[in-house]
């Protein structure tokens, strides 16, 4: 065990998260760290040309690439939770941005905290239900398309196996294999149960015949994440008048948007700070726009 005083603070945080939510919850952070490490060492290798440094880089870089491969494979092994995480991030992002924009627009039209709260909670309920329903429909539509492609390919393979095998051989030849090599690979794949089908799906449709995640569960994650995130811009108006409440709401939501951007960066591999700042700009920009619209509306309504 590494002595506690020898660990960096960020490593202690990662260990705590892993122990609480499982190792899969931090694999994205670890993988991004390995990708960033490879880029850092490559940059150093281009600048430091002395033989000793180059010899060190020849040892370090393959090691870092091996680490990146290991963490990527581990992420793929726990990939069943990716859909849930993606749905939760989507719901939370929309809950923060759209609800802040809604309460900002109402705050521009009225100085009544009660009116802002009513509008905010109405938007929370409507948005959570709408996001959950939209998530269910989109996930089911994608799954149905995949299921249809798998079914059609399976039927075509049963009726004309040699034709489908020839298509697979042609696909491998297009990738640079010789006719003999492509034929050997196709024969080897055809020797395993459903091997030819899986390969055809991968080469022709770009899909894998794998199990689907529950559309209902993903929809629930999206709706729940929306509702929980939407509470942040609303809660300050429970305790504060309209103007101070709006200021606190913007500040709290900006922090949450930044954290949402950091979470998004784990999957996009973009820099954390840039992703967080982008989320803040988009969210606060939408809120500013609706606030400016709310001002003349409020004046017109008296």
Image: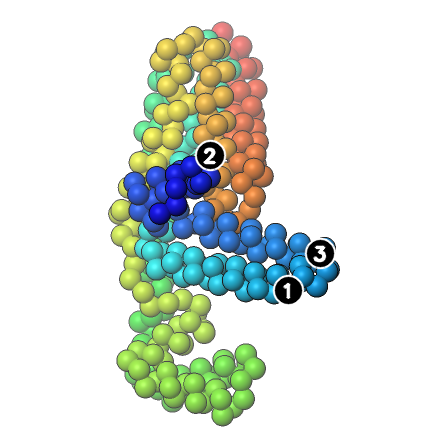
Q: Secondary structure at mark 1?
A: helix
Residue 13 sits in which quadrant?
Answer: top left
From the image, tell me which residue sits under label 3.
48
What is the distance, in whole Å, between disc 1 and disc 2 at their CAs? 40 Å
- The residue positioned 54% from the left and 89% from the top of the image is 178
Q: Earlier in the sequence, mark 3 or mark 1?
A: 3
Q: Earlier in the sequence, mark 1 or mark 2?
A: 1
Q: Are marks 1 and 2 in contact (CB under 8 Å)?
A: no
Residue 113 picture location, percent across and down: 40, 11
Q: Is residue 274 visible?
A: yes
What is the distance, in whole Å, between disc 3 and disc 1 at their CAs? 11 Å
From the image, tell me which residue sits under label 1.
55
- The residue positioned 43% from the left and 8% from the top of the image is 241
Residue 254 picture location, percent across and down: 50, 27
- The residue positioned 56% from the left and 25% from the top of the image is 289
Residue 260 picture location, percent across and down: 46, 36
The image's mark for residue 259 is: 2
């Amino acid at each position: 065990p590494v002595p506690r005083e020898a660990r960096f603070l960020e490593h202690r945080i990662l260990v705590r998260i892993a122990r609480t939510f499982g190792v899969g919850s931090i694999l994205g952070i670890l993988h991004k760290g390995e990708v960033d490490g490879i880029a850092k060492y490559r940059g150093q290798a281009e600048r430091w040309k002395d033989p000793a440094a180059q010899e060190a880089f020849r040892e370090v870089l393959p090691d870092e690439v091996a680490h990146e491969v290991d963490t990527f494979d581990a992420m793929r092994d726990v990939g069943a939770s990716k859909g849930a995480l993606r749905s939760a991030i989507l719901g939370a992002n929309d809950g923060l941005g759209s609800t802040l924009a809604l309460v900002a627009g109402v705050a521009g039209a009225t100085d009544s905290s009660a009116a802002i709260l009513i509008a905010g909670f109405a938007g929370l309920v409507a948005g959570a239900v709408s996001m959950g329903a939209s998530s269910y429909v989109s996930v089911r539509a994608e799954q149905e398309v995949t299921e249809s492609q798998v079914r059609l390919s399976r039927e075509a393979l049963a009726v004309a196996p040699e034709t489908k095998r020839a298509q697979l051989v042609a696909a491998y030849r297009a990738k640079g294999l010789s006719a003999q090599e492509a034929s050997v690979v196709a024969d080897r794949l055809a020797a395993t149960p459903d091997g030819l089908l899986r390969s055809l799906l991968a080469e022709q449709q770009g899909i894998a015949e794998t199990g689907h995640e529950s559309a209902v569960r993903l929809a629930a994650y999206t709706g729940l994440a929306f509702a929980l995130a939407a509470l942040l811009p609303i809660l300050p108006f429970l305790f504060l008048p309209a103007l101070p409440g709006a200021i606190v709401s913007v500040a709290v939501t900006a922090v949450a948007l930044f954290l949402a951007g950091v979470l998004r960066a784990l999957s996009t591999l973009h820099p954390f700070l840039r992703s967080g700042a982008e989320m803040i700009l988009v969210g606060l920009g939408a809120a500013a726009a609706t606030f400016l619209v709310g001002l003349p509306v409020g004046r017109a309504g008296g």
